[in-house]
Image (spheres, rainbow, N blue to C red):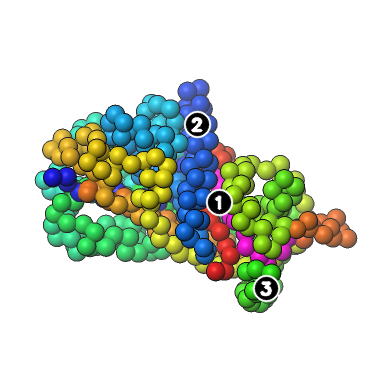
Amino acid sequence: MRSAVIFLALACGVLSGPVEDEATQEFVTGNHKFTAAIYKEIIKKEKGNIIVSPLSAETVLALTNEGARGETSREFVTGLSLPSSNEKIQKAFKTFLPKLKRSEDDLKLLSANKIYVGKDVKLVDSFRDIATTIYDSGVDNVNFAENVQAAQTINGWVEDNTNDKIKNLIAPDSISDDTKMVLVNALYFSGKWVSRFEDYETTKKKFYKSKADTVDVDTMHQVEYLNYYENPALKAKFLELPYQGADITMVIVLPDEIEGLGALEQNIEQVLEPQPFTKERVDVDLPKFTIETEIKFVPILKSLGIQRIFSDSADLSGLSSTHKDLYVSDVIQKAFINVTETGTEAAAATAVGIALLSAPILGSGGYIFRADHPFIYYIRENRSGGLLFVGRYNQN
């Protein structure tokens, strides 16, 4: 009989050195590819607002992969678009994850990992070493038979590491005495705009859900010099809003047409690529918004070719020296984002259960950017190019 394990996650990432540079590039390229693939799978079923952190899932699943063997590991590496060797994967995360720990007056970025182990489970020494030295993961024991207390312990850790924004990630009835391990990665980001939107300029304005359907939303406004680009091939405008204290930005991608989001999403790979921004004077309207989502990752991962970990064919024998018959029963992520006049707060948590229009030019030489219809947004660490969060705002 297979034993159960649950892995949890939140997002972020980067690297350096000759071999490390190659590993970094592979990791960032893979991060973009995985983000685009995840986004395309999510929008097949989700029609409303979205916030997701593929990097969070990528981090916790990469940690899981350290205990995978054979074809199970090959599926992980291919499906997650990880670097081509274990050495490169470890080099990437060892340099990348520390960059996700920042605490300043105007910017906070925290990424943390934790492994909860059942009382009758012993980790393989090499896996424990990699988890602690590469992924900076703590290891705690918990009695999964006492499922309510175990869920409270795990959920409490997630809340503490996401400023109480991600709650009840694990339901008590999702764990039992069969659960042998829970791996958790938590990501939290809070940043203030370099150029904030003034409160007194926020007013109710029409947002076009479609050409025929509008709703009044709180809309922020400013005129500022910002990185801006009009992409004729994608028929979309790109606007970059920087945060204070670090090279982290939010990019808003606005289709030219009111109902142009669908076509834009079909080219999400190009949307996520770096754009040739130039500094321009831009008159900006942007809705205030708060989005919370819960994403079921199992069908998404299966569609990307990661299937063995959910079956009797799973080989996770490198995780535990006492339990070799482990498999993944579930993968869940909860994510949150709040965009206001002062800045952005965002968080994500992923649980893996193992059972285991052209802008008119202003007279002053500037541009108009009216985000009054559905758009894509993402938060990026610019030094590496790593994507932390991606989402969609369409008011549905």
Q: Residue at x 45, y 36 (%)?
A: 81
Most frequent secondary structure within the magenta stretch:
strand
Q: Residue at x 71, y 60 (%)?
A: 257
Q: Residue 325: x and y, percent?
A: 17, 40
Position of the C terminus by quadrant: bottom right
Q: Residue 109: x and y, percent?
A: 47, 51
Query: Is residue 126 toward the left or the right of residue 258 in the image?
Result: left
Residue type highlighted by circle 2: Glu
Badge 3 crowding class, 10 Å Cα cut-off, few under 14, some 14 to 19, many 20 or more, is few
Residue highlighted by disc 3: 212
Report the magenta residues as a range: 369-381
Residue highlighted by disc 1: 379
The residue closer to the viewer here, 205 or 255, is 255
Question: Does label 1 or label 3 sit earlier along the sequence?
Answer: 3
Residue type highlighted by circle 1: Ile
Q: Residue at x 77, y 52 (%)?
A: 280
Give the quadrant of residue 125: top left
Q: Nearer the viewer, mark 1 or mark 3?
A: 3
Dot 2: what SS?
Answer: helix
